[in-house]
Image (tube, rainbow, N blue to C red):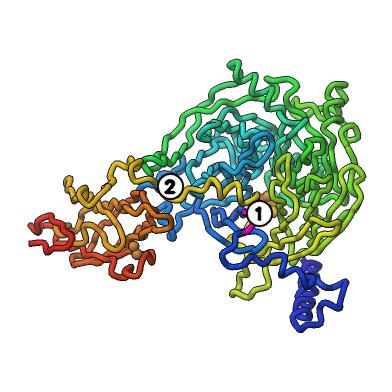
Amino acid sequence: MKNNLKIFAALFVVALLNSCGNGSSSKSGSALSSSAAEKVYVAPGEHDSHYAFLSGGYSGNLTVYGLPSGRMFKEIPVFSQFPTSGYGYSEETKPMLNTSHGFIPWGDSHHPDISQTNGEIDGRFIFINENNTPRIAKIDLKTFETTEIIEVPNSAGNHSSSFVTENTEYVVAGTRFSVPIPQRDMPIKDYKGNFKGALSFISVEPEHGHMDIKFQVLMPGFNYDLSHPGRGKSHGWFFFTTYNTEEASTLLEVNASQNDKDFIAAINWKKIEEYVNNGGGTMMPANYAHNVYDEATHTATSTMKKEVRVVNPSEVPGAVYLLPTPKSPHGCDVDPTGEYIVGNGKLSANLTVHSFTKMLDAIENKKFDGDAYGIPILKFEDVLAGSVEQPGLGPLHTEFDGKGNAYTTFFISSEVVKWKLGTWEVLDRKPTYYSVGHLTIPGGNSGKPQGKYMFAMNKITNLPTGPEMEHSAQLYDISGDKMELLLDFPTHGEPHYAAAMRADIIKERSQKIYNLEDNKHAYAAKSDDDTKVVRKGNEVHIYMTTIRSHFSPDNIEGIKVGDKVYFHVTNLEQDFDVPHGFAVLGQNTSELLIMPGQTKSSVWEPKQVGVWPFYCTDFCSALHQEMQGYIRVSAKNSNTKLAWSLGEDIE
Ligand code: K7E
Ligand code: CUA
């Protein structure tokens, strides 16, 4: 940490000098060249060339940025309740956050990954993991909305997730913590040999992207840290880094660092898929939620699934191997050709790169070095492609530019190092502001990286905002031989990984409005004539519409304390970018943000008699401030008549 602080302080001083106007003369220390600002300047009205989707870490969300400007466009709520849009508050979206443990409106999301076709990023969906209550979400890039969340049973600390295969056959989710499978009451000290690690292969239906857990591989009780799909020649395989192969259950900082080498687990998923398609594996009882948002009804449903198919590696000989990798590897990255598998050993002096070709060769010639719980361990020397000697301290993650170069982040020495695949020579290094985690090259996790930019995500900025400073990302131009630092921009939550891609592909597919005609919401009111208020016992359903600049109805009477009042608000607008909002005084789930053509509902259980105002929360026209109404709440035993109106008095 001390070193980091020193580097941080040095950079800070350099930044100050630069701002005094004498920075350009100091060549070695200058963090930014004078033309950097021009390279990131996107004029008002112009669009950025790339989208970047940064995970929010403990915000549970995904944030959308433009590159090269570093402007934040949107925060997409995924695993959190989100007041801005009412996600997780509205009746339609509450089911999205349902789990086998009940309603969980918080998550820890680390690794977004965009869907692919033929090994290229296609911009249809983006997937992201939730660590704490293991879940995988899918966001539709047509609407930038979370449309599906599946819980992952038998998993814990769902971290080696969510990475997609080259035709989005699967989105893969690996457990970080091993646990008893099935979960049961047992002594923690009996971990070793008894806990297991589940690696889940979630199939993605090609047309709509519906997710389903096809099978789980029950691996030995290691920690599965990160993963990547094979691609090109290694398509059909998946690679997972492991640590704690010691299977310690206490003081892991010491006890999980004993072994000189841990493993990268190589899984031939095609082989296991074939086994499963022929009826292989065992259905085991499980309990997990599958939540799907339906675009026609604008409503999510949550279904509890009751079983999952599991496969033990011993059932499918030749499907699982272990590649020794020094030392507690974190990132597990595969180059665009699929030949090289990089294991970023956090505690190792060198970066280890394995060769897929050599791995196949070693398997064929049975060059094994023992086994772990029956899984063959390949000999380190037989699978090693090469190593980058002493490139830095604390390697975490590697990305590729598609031109034969790799870029690795070093957490302890706070830098990004560029090196060459095949020759393993270090070509360039650039400091980062503070301890860096992941880095991203647009399309970097595919067979076709989209060059030009790379950004590194750091654990802090130097902007004083109270005891906690926001994190930051740093953007580099990587089109030349040397990396050029262009920009530093603050980020939200704690970004871990990010996915990025060319903007044009997403822009083309972007949806502008929801067609009112296609709205199949059970409580939609598609014109002012459909508006009504219906009482069913103590439930009151208000079918309401909005259009610039009024609600219909805007006067409602006959509500009583103790009622459960549902506001079902349909936005009748059919123009781009005219949402209306809805909130009523005293409602604890206030705030709906309703897009054109959409219906959203919120529930209100008024506790006090009175005449309470409601209003539009989104500045929608010059008469936005006039967009308001009143709802009268009477005593429980009153006989105020249920009535509603627009443009006239209730008699
Ligand atoms: Cu390295 Cu969760 Cu991908 Cu953070 S992880 S940095
Ligand atoms: Cu509608 Cu403001």
Q: As displayed, is residue 177 above or below residue 440?
A: above
The residue range painted magenta reads 48-52
Circle nearer the viewer, 2 or 1: 1
How many labels, in total? 2
Is residue 569 in sight in this rendering? yes
Q: Amino acid at mark 1?
A: His
In the image, 386: left or right of 124? right
The percent position of residue 204, horizontal first and vertical second, equals: 56, 33
In the image, 513: left or right of 525? right
Q: Identify the mark at residue 496; answer none if there is no mark.
A: 1
Image quarter of the N terminus: bottom right
In the image, 83: left or right of 636? right
Is residue 196 in sight in this rendering? no
> In terms of depth relative to the viewer, which is nearer, 372 or 540?
540
**Residue drawn at 36 percent across, 66 percent down:** 621
In the image, 270: left or right of 203? right
- Quickly name the residue at label 2: 103
